[in-house]
Image (cartoon, coloured by chain):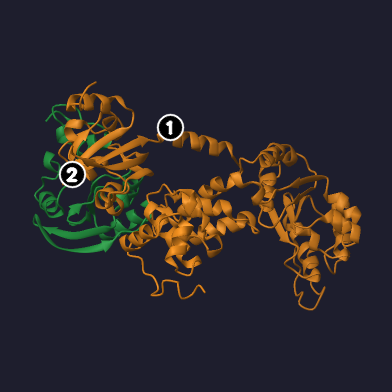
Chain colours: A green, B orange
Amino acid sequence: MTVAVPVWDHMISPVLDTARLLRIFEIADGIPGAYHEYPLPDGAANKAAMIAEHAEVLVCGALSAELEQALRGHGVSVHPWIMGEASVVIAGFAGGEIHSLEYSMPGCRRRGRRGRGPHCARHGSRRMNGA
Amino acid sequence: MDGPMDTRETDIILDSITDGVFTVGGDWRITSFNRAAERITGVERADAEGQLCSYVFRASICEGGCALRRTMETGEPVMNLPIYIIRADGRKIPVSISTALLKDRDGAVIGGVETFRDLSVEEELKRELASRASFEDMVSRNHRMQELFALLPAVAESAATVLVTGESGTGKELVCRAIHSLSPRAGGPFVTVNCAALPDTLLESELFGYKAGAFTDARTDRAGHIARADGGTLLLDEIGDISPALQVKLLRFLQEKEYQPLGSERTEHADVRVLTATNRDLAALTGTGEFRQDLYYRINVVALDLPPLRERREDIPLLAAHFIDHFNRLTGRAIEGITDAALAALLEHDYPGNIRELENAIEHAFVLCRGGRIRPEHLPAAFRPVSAMAAGDSSGTIRDCEIAAIMHALRTNGYNRTAAAHTLGIHKSTLHRKIRAFNLDLPDTDGRSIIE
């Protein structure tokens, strides 16, 4: 599986719409391999097309509805609202733990309450349903 | 209230204001987050505090252009910078931000404070106003243009010939296209002929068509533009440039709706609504005999005059925004707008090329601007302003404006520091300090040897 994450310094980029660098790596048998990095273009359409060209899965921070729609239109499986150190997130994703609380952006978590916003609800589904 | 306020009192005050306010420590983690910040971002205070501000605020400038970082590094505040943030539902919320250093009672810097205002309502109002200012791909708030917009539906509905006048680049063809698209002929063809682009003999054959053998290269019959516009609208652009001989033939067509292709003895008929456009003064040309008076009166049934852009400067910001949207769509990019300084440069220009010149300037800026907002240095040289420095750029480049002002003063005073300081209205020692602080690269001469 080819996975892409936008990175800024050593962290997951906070906003994909303005992210400048994309890290691509392969996950085989739950283990992330070596990665390559590519500059990201401007504009939702260009960005989505470039990501789709390099990866099947995207793990990212915040992104606009427009960009998310463009990515899904290209068939990319999007896991948004994720934060943290890139290497830790990648390991978490490889281990199937990406939707646990520690990786979720503030506002997409639950503290015994329903989460805010339809996007967070969709992608943090276990937590949002009373878990 | 005596003595300094305690934290509780400060929280009460911060929670009562409508602007979002948050503070960060030196580690960029949120240390306070007021109620308005919760409302605008959609993130609760309990979730925000202790988190990295970029993961809470999710702003368009977090990566690579953080205003708070700039303030904490330089000590200079940022005021009213328009950006956007992304809420958890994926909506981009326009906000304007201001930043300042956070200091303790002893004046030591302990972090930063950022305030932000939700501009959603303001942006929506701007969009509403813009939609009222637009008509059939044309945008204007100018009263003369608004009067013209109001006339167009009635003009379109009629079959009258129209003469559209105005300088080059004022949008004459756009007006004609609007007339066609509003008319009962909207489903038919819209054919444009530039009468100035072709020599007269070629123009005649292009307009009326020709039969095979009509002239040396006429190997087959060819329909002219009039035939191609049958059922629709024909725009004769630059009609002031056609020869007297062709004017006669054109007059016959306008009067009788009949014409003869070159080399044909048969008279053809065409159901065509004719619009004409020119940047020349046809009334004056009738006086000199260059333009037939009977033809002038035939085409001047309805006259629409477009003002030059320098007479409708209030439209420049609107048009600039319109072209930025246009080129963003065309290029798939996301240029966010234009800085106050660049807009000031656009407003100062005289526009001999009118709207077309403004469009070209924005297109030029798109080549040089790699992201964010268009700045003065992205504009063509003819727009490069000196006075735009006085526009008070509020985009966060106050430092850039200060450097530009210093460099301009030095250049115009031959790098004489004393004279440049006098021009800037500051003491010479202040100028020297700023040259060192900004690390300006200057010629070795201090100008004293240049000024005799």
Q: Residues within 10 Å of mark 1 (few under 14, many from 20)?
A: few
Q: Earlier in the sequence, mark 2 or mark 1?
A: 2
Q: Which residue is drawn at 84% across and 65% down?
A: B243
Local secondary structure at mark 1: helix
**Which residue lies most toward the top here?**
B1
Local secondary structure at mark 2: loop
Which residue occupies the foreground of this view, A115 or B254?
Answer: A115
Q: Position of residue B34 (x, y in %)?
A: 25, 30
Q: Residues within 10 Å of mark 2 (few under 14, many from 20)?
A: few
Residue on which the image places disc 2 = B108
* Occupied quadrant, residue B399: bottom left
Query: What amino acid is found at the position of numbered circle 2 in the picture?
Result: Ala
Residue on which the image places disc 1 = B121
Which residue occupies the foreground of this view, B175 or B390?
Answer: B390
Q: Residue A72: tell me if it is visible.
A: yes
Q: Where is residue B310 in the image (x, y as percent from the top left)?
A: 65, 51
**Does B413 sit left or right of B25 as displayed?**
right
Q: Position of residue A18 (x, y in %)?
A: 32, 51
Which residue occupies the foreground of this view, B200 or A17?
Answer: A17
- Vertical placement of residue B240 versus B29, above or below: below
**Does B310 sit left or right of B47 as displayed?**
right
**Does B205 sit left or right of A62 as displayed?**
right
Disc 2 to disc 1: CB gap under 8 Å: no
Q: Position of residue B388 (x, y in %)?
A: 50, 54
Query: What amino acid is found at the position of numbered circle 1 in the picture?
Result: Val
